[in-house]
Image (tube, rainbow, N blue to C red):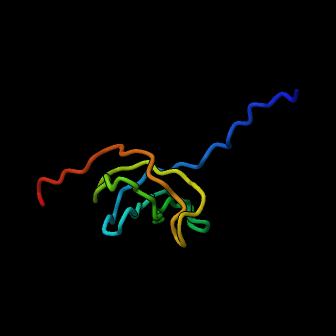
Amino acid sequence: MVEQKNIQRSIRREKVGIVVSDKMHKTITVAVARKAMHSKYKKFINKTSKFKAHDEKEQAGMGDKVLIYETAPISKTKRWKLAKILEVADRSLE
């Protein structure tokens, strides 16, 4: 009898960002901001990257703060999935 080892899945990368688009079917675009130091001037500058994430239940809306995690490719540009909504945006002005 061969004993099975507990093989733990590697830790997936996670990012926190703001939903900037929810117009696609089951897809949201999340903008993730970070600070990077300029190589010459040694000043911190803000940089933003946008990621397309899969939102199966279409529950995230514009302006929501969300947690996404990396997964196997879902489509040509989608490689992230929505883990949870951290903060819901105020939509009373719409």
Work out whether residue 17 or residue 56 is closer to the camera in this orientation and state it. Answer: 56
Where is 68 relative to 2, above or below? below
Q: In this view, does 30 lie to the left or right of 7?
A: left
Where is 59 relative to 2, above or below? below
Work out whether residue 70 or residue 48 is closer to the camera in this orientation and state it. Answer: 70
Q: Which residue is drawn at 74% across and 36% down?
A: 7
Where is 68 relative to 11, above or below? below
Q: In which quarter of the image is the N terminus?
A: top right
Q: Which residue is drawn at 61% across and 66% down?
A: 39
Which residue is farthest left? 93
Q: Is residue 40 left or right of residue 43?
A: right
Work out whether residue 63 or residue 69 is closer to the camera in this orientation and state it. Answer: 69
Q: Quadrant of the C terminus?
A: bottom left
Which residue is farthest right? 1
Across and down, in percent, residue 12 comes to 60, 47
Across and down, in percent, residue 44 comes to 50, 59
Q: In this view, does 88 lie to the left or right of 27?
A: left
Work out whether residue 49 or residue 41 is closer to the camera in this orientation and state it. Answer: 49
Q: Which residue is drawn at 52% across and 61% down?
A: 43
